[in-house]
Image (cartoon, helix red, strand yellow):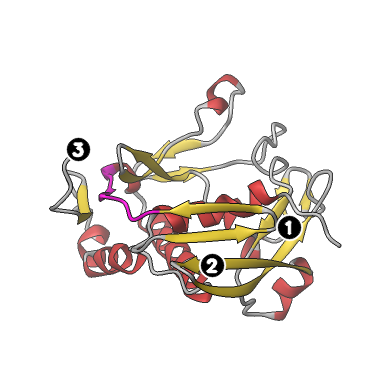
Amino acid sequence: MNTFNTKDLFYIIDILGSLTKEQVKVTIGKNSKIYLQPEKIVLSTKFFQSWICPPCEINNCCNKINTCLFYAQIPNEEMKKVFTEECDILVDKQGNIEKSKLYVYNRTIGCVYLKNYRCLIQDYKPLQCRIIPLHFDCYKHTIHILKRIYKRNWAMKCPLKILPFDFETFKRDLRFLKELNQCANDLNLKTFLPEIITYLENNEIEFKKGNLPKNNIIIYFNENYSA
């Protein structure tokens, strides 16, 4: 029986759970988590930033995660060469339990797809690897979607840099959100990702012109909520 680092497997599930539209319990192995619908979802102006993550000797990100999940479905043969193992996942919606499988890349020491601090599978690396530096921070039942450097990396002299808006980076972020949404669909999880994606697509032309939001965008707000 394969042994997986369930903490790492929950990395992406935690993001999907933070954006859930309904109460859901997710179980991987012996670990379970319950996710509740947030009261508010905010797309921060800090989402509209570019970034660069140059090859570095720190490898605090690339070598930290041991078990990388991908989709419940793998779209092409190249990805299947990387994600060769499977892991069961149970999604419980108030007693209605659905079982799916996650394709997993599992490693014990380091990543075999790193060479000279460069990734050899850029086009199909795990969602965990591509999410940096996008964050879904939770504060007082509100989810803030933004880009920032990991706090621990300041002390480690992380070379990642946050830069002004760049349309190509925006397009890359949009593709990532769509793949994240596909992951949610594969697992039959209802999230607010479609609303986020729709807002970004509807305003894509304005963003390309450089007309970026001056204030944070409220994607969802529960009018019945009182802090």
Q: In the displayed structure, does residue 108 sit left or right of residue 27? A: right
**Residue shown at 53%/52% (left/top)?**
33
Q: Position of residue 205 (x, y in %)?
A: 23, 66
Q: Magenta residues, as a range?
A: 36-45
Q: Position of residue 159 (x, y in %)?
A: 57, 32
What crowding class fits label 3: few (fewer than 14 Cα within 10 Å), some (14-19), or many (20 or more)?
Answer: few
Is label 2 in a helix, a strand or a loop?
strand
Lower sequence index among marks 1 and 3: 1
Residue, disc 1: 120
Nearer to the camera, 55 or 75:
75
On screen, residue 137 above or below 168: above
Nearer to the camera, 177 or 4:
4
Residue, disc 2: 91
Residue, disc 3: 227
Number of numbered discs on residues? 3
Lower sequence index among marks 3 and 2: 2
Q: CA distance from mark 2 to mark 1?
A: 33 Å
Q: Position of residue 21 (x, y in %)?
A: 33, 63
What crowding class fits label 2: few (fewer than 14 Cα within 10 Å), some (14-19), or many (20 or more)?
Answer: many
**Residue shown at 60%/41% (left/top)?**
54
Q: In the displayed structure, does residue 168 sit left or right of residue 14? A: left
Q: CA distance from mark 3 to mark 2?
A: 29 Å
- Examine the structure image and report whether residue 218 is included in the region drawn in magenta: no
Q: Which mark is residue 201?
A: none
